[in-house]
Image (cartoon, helix red, strand yellow):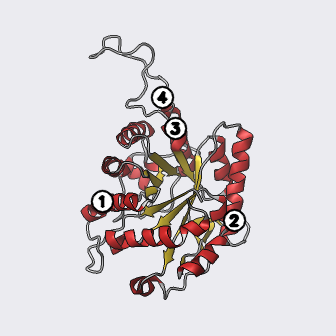
Amino acid sequence: MKKIGFLSFGHWTPSHQSQTRSASDALLQSIDLAVAAEELGADGAYFRVHHFARQLASPFPLLAAVGAKTSRIEIGTAVIDMRYENPLYMAEDAGAADIIAAGRLQLGISRGSPEQVIDGWRYFGYIPPEGQTDADMARHHTQVFLDVLRGEGFAKPNPRPMFPNPPGPLRLEPHSEGLRERIWWGASSNATAKWAAELGMNLQSSTLKNDETGEPFHIQQAAQIRVFREAWKAAGHQREPRVSVSRSIFALVSDRDRAYFGQGDEGQDQIGFIDENTRAIFGRSYAAEPDALIGQLAKDEAIAEADTLLLTVPNQLGVDYNAHVIEAILSHVAPALGWR
């Protein structure tokens, strides 16, 4: 395991039981947690994007703010739903955020998952062409996004511009060199993992994937990673790809930890349906004393296959407690798994 970061969904609710009661709390605490995670030595601060929900949504203002307040930690998403995105405008936002962060952006994108409203992307002005699905539309947006990130000129310049132009067709600005190689695809199936590899995207695999074989979640996820790596090699890309997996992991090192997570019954995978036709498997959570936790995680085949582990954090418990959750893993568990 080369890198360990956190993944926050940025939930907020006005409940008195929540430490994150408003959108302002969710955003500002996300910045504070990224700063704290960097100070603790974590490698990444990642954020989930959901629309029409009391969660983090527009990622680029947040990523730019985190980039400005930190200096070392990777910053990214897991994931942005490409059904909702204008790929050219997104490329400008991503380029700006990456420049502010001095090239630390690791941008996870995907076709998305079921949302709070029906066909929410329609409200954003996007409708799949005749004969295509919303997934097709997401993949088309992705390919356009990847193309413009190469930084090649494609737009015909005005012969009478307001300001002087460089010669030839114009590209989008600001262009951030190297960002194209730091795009990740959140894949829920083996087929989309293979597609991502063929396009030269890194792989993000979460705590949910299509149940394709009936085997335990970590075994299916490890197989998905191997499919990805084989497709990457066959495509002939020159660099090594990166692969992340997400997990809910809690080291029980205090009475508060035990009160929050020591009584749970989430040590088994769960089966469900993410839509009418897709059977999915949801990976188990881990919560145990450090020695027991190390033994459990050592048996997780997907963690062993990946180079990056993203710890999903209960952000509504506040910045201080989530920093404690991250520190407990980094101090008591991660070194035994080969981290640093």
Query: On the image, which quarter does residue 335 sit in?
Result: bottom right
Q: Amino acid at mark 3?
A: Arg
Locate the C terminus by quadrant: bottom right
Q: Earlier in the sequence, mark 3 or mark 1?
A: 1
The residue labelled by disc 4 is: 151
Q: Secondary structure at mark 3?
A: helix
| Marks 3 and 1 close (CB-CB < 8 Å) | no
**Mark 1 Cα-neighbour bin, 10 Å: few <14, some 14–19, many ≥20:** many
Mark 2, Cα crowd under 10 Å, few <14 / some 14-19 / many 20+, is many
The image shows residue 64 at horizontal and vertical percentages of: 33, 46
Dot 1 lies on which element?
Answer: helix
Mark nearer the N terminus (2 vs 1): 1
Per the image, the residue denoted by label 2 is 220
Give the mark, 2 or 3, whose residue is nearer the N terminus.
Answer: 3
188 w.r.t. 152: above or below: below
Residue 257, image x, y percentages: 43, 82
Q: CA distance from mark 3 to mark 1?
A: 26 Å
Label 3: how many residues lie within 10 Å, few (<14), some (14-19) or many (20+)? Answer: many
Name the residue at 59% across, 71% down: 283
Report the Cα–Cα distance between label 2 and label 3: 28 Å
Sequence-wise, the earlier of marks 4 and 1 is: 1
Query: Residues at badges 3 and 4 in contact (C-beta under 8 Å)?
Result: yes
- Identified by mark 1, the residue type is Leu
Mark 3 or mark 4: name the one nearer the start of the chain.
Answer: 4
- Label 3 belongs to which residue? 180
